[in-house]
Image (cartoon, rainbow, N blue to C red):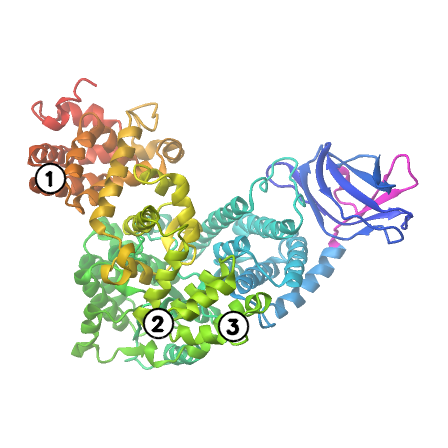
Amino acid sequence: MSYYDSRNRIRLRISEIRLQPSISERAIKVKIFVDGVFIKELPSIERGQPLKWSDLNIIDASQTSRLELALYERQYRKHSQYDSDSCLVSELEGIVTKMLKIQGTQYSAELTILDQTQAEELFAKSREKLGKIGQTGGANDKFKNTQRMFKSMLEFGSAVAELNPIAKTVLAVCTRAWERLEEQQKSGEELDDLARGLAGMVPLVDEVKKYAQLESLRQNLEEFLRMIEDVSIFVLERKTKGFVVQAFRSVFDSSDRDQVEELVKRFQKTKSDFDMAVGVQTMAMVATADERELLKQLNPVEPSGHDPSRGCQDGTRLGVLGYIDDWTADQTPSSTFMWIYGQAGIGKSTILTSVCNRLSEKGIPIVSFFCKRDDPALRDPLRLINSVVHGLACRYPPYGKRVAKAIEANSELCTSHLRVRYQGLLRKPLSGIENVPPQPYFVLIDAMDECGADDNRRQLMEHLLELSSLVPWLKVIITSRPDSDIRSFFDQPNTMSVSRCDLQSYSAANDIRAFINVTLNDIAIRDEWPADGVSRLCTKAGELFIWAATACKFIIKADDTRDRFRQLINENTSGGGFNGLDALYMAVIRNSMADQADDSILNMRRCIGAIVTISMRQPVPIEVLCEIMQPYMKSGPLRKVVGRLGAVVYSDAHLAGAIRVLHPSFADFVLDEARSSIFWVDPIERNIEISVGCMSTMEHELRFNICDLETSHLLNREVRDLESKIEANISGQLAYSCVYWINHVVDCDDKATARLVANILDNPRLLYWLEVLSVLRRVDVAVQGLRELSLWLMLYQRDIAHYVWDAYRFVFAFSDAIIASAPHIYISALPLAPKQSESTTGSLQL
């Protein structure tokens, strides 16, 4: 069975290759070639054994390609080669078997092509497999993530199996891949990353079941099926390299890591297209095209919701989840707001993810927003409000129509102050709705303590509390640390009706024990730990899940796990409080160092400091980090240090591999001198280094017409391929530097750094910088930043402060033109600037 895709290829699925005669007196192996290019070597079959290969072989090739086999017969330690007849790939389409004569021998090869009958059989088998996935215990978390991925893929295929002709075939391949994994009962780093990247498949299945019959979604569903099959091929490929070669154009022609990133990107793009198509179908019932365009102005954060793969391990946290389940099912009008709180590392985000999963599984509409302090969009209260509004508008059309009407009447609502947004986009539209939906809706906000500053966070909580009482069908759940500003808010008399869930009152010791057992038990047996080793680690963990998770990562990544185990047991690393967590973090850092020399300590401080300090603005990939830190640290050592810190930092596939802190408690640790000692991240020193790196990058990379725009007659939004021009010409380090260099400069008190500012704002580099901000749609950075920089320079470098103020006035005056078009910096703003303006005088001759 095969099908054509848009690139005019054929995908062959060869389910079996059998030789006749079926027994040989000599060992035989076979290789597959397409157009003379080696594709795969089939395993050698010893003398006297049936000459049959039943592994699924999948080949993507052009219709005009020719396929042939080569038979190798072992004689006296040498192999004699015999080639088969060749056949056009197109000849194999639509047939069940094909015979190829092996020239110069008595053999013929019978190729069996996966046909509809076999697909039907495997489809039935997949339904049986689907019911059993996850029923067996003892799997570690990585393998469970992979289980969820395959379960969701099989469920997706089943949902469209009767509507799409290729679905059952795809499910057959998917089932084969799952059987392969099931035999191994383990999942590597790449598969775990892939499973996390495809976590959005879980909630997608319910949407597919609703809309699978819509003809307008047919192409999108087929793209999902192709992606599912390619994921399955990747899994099969990992066992035997060379398993799939796409003779026309391979997407598997790089490393496993590159393949994972490509598959995740494909999934995100396909899901985005699907969500958009479904949104159109849903909104079509209640909204015009103009109304849909209006809702786009909300610009919600994507993705901002929960990652289904990051929920609690099966069978854990049942007590607290049961309490929350009871509350979500409670129909009492006064019970509409819940605050879940607990110390850092106790598992708040994991618990809320499980709550989201449980509500979604029941078909209850949810809008979730998971705040992150190291993500500008996910820590912004304004973006949170817009995302909640957009989520509710898409899920409840009557509300969506009212929001669109409000935006049409006042488009500034989407970009206004917090209170104005809340009043115009939530309070007024919801208050006017009389219809009550048949089931409740939930808004779930994680890590409120990581969103905004104290003042606007309090205002946000006031709005969310009122939101939960505006209509009887809407409930709100938030999680946070019990920080003083949040606790004082919930100590007010008007919050007495708020349901509280103190995670400290639910013992997590047994759940942590289950987690550590599943994660480390096999390793403990393999590496001959003491009999009570895992139990002693569980005792050390106490009630902190983050201690357990970090310790497990720390051990798993070690060359000698027994040595790491002894280190954790012998040191004062009990997880009962900050002292234990601090000792664990200190052990992780020290073990990430090649030695304890002063230069190694300095490099470690710089590396951790760069990650934490930059992440406060915008996390960046390792390549960008290396470029920014280049004046102080070579790329090689920095990459090694980051690689060794895998227990506390990670590469986020959703953000192009950005390096992020695994848990906020680690950032808290390194930013506190009393706790982190010699590894303290001194904010002033680190900001000096990063600001120097940013300014060095800008000096070397800024240039006139950086995006090579061919005409000044088009506005930025009218340049059709502007995004590709940005990607080709503006490096990641330049983009970061242009947006955040002023932030880093004003966060240090260094005169030498202040003097470097003149190099950046010296004409014409000021204009080149504005070019980059224009195409990146971040001119606001110059408007706000230059004013702040001018005030800061009055303290450290007064002689250039007035020049910066002049530049601020120039940008403020011509911001509309700069925002609209990068070329208009030169053809509109510059000619109209006052001739005596110091910020532009040197540029008038350009």
Span of residues in magenta: 89-116
Residue at (55% x, 57% y) in the render? 212
CA–CA distance in space, label 2 to label 1: 54 Å
Badge 3 element: helix
Which one is in front in this view, the residue at disc 3 or the one at disc 1? 3
Quadrant of the rendered image containing residue 434: bottom left
Quadrant of residue 368 within the rendered picture: bottom left
Mark 3 and mark 1 lie on one chain; the one further toward the N terminus is 3
Question: Disc 2 vs disc 1: which is toward the camera?
Answer: 1
Q: Residue at x 47, y 50 (%)?
A: 268
Which kind of residue does numbered mark 1 sit on? Answer: Ser
- Which residue does the numbered mark 3 point to in the structure image? 517
Residue 790's disc number: 1
From the top left corner, tell me how far across and down residue 699 is, in percent: 26, 30
Q: Is 112 one of the magenta-colored residues?
A: yes
Q: In what element is the residue under mark 2? A: loop
Quarter placement of the C terminus: top left
Specify the amino acid type for callout 3: Asn
- Between disc 2 and disc 3, whose residue precedes? 2
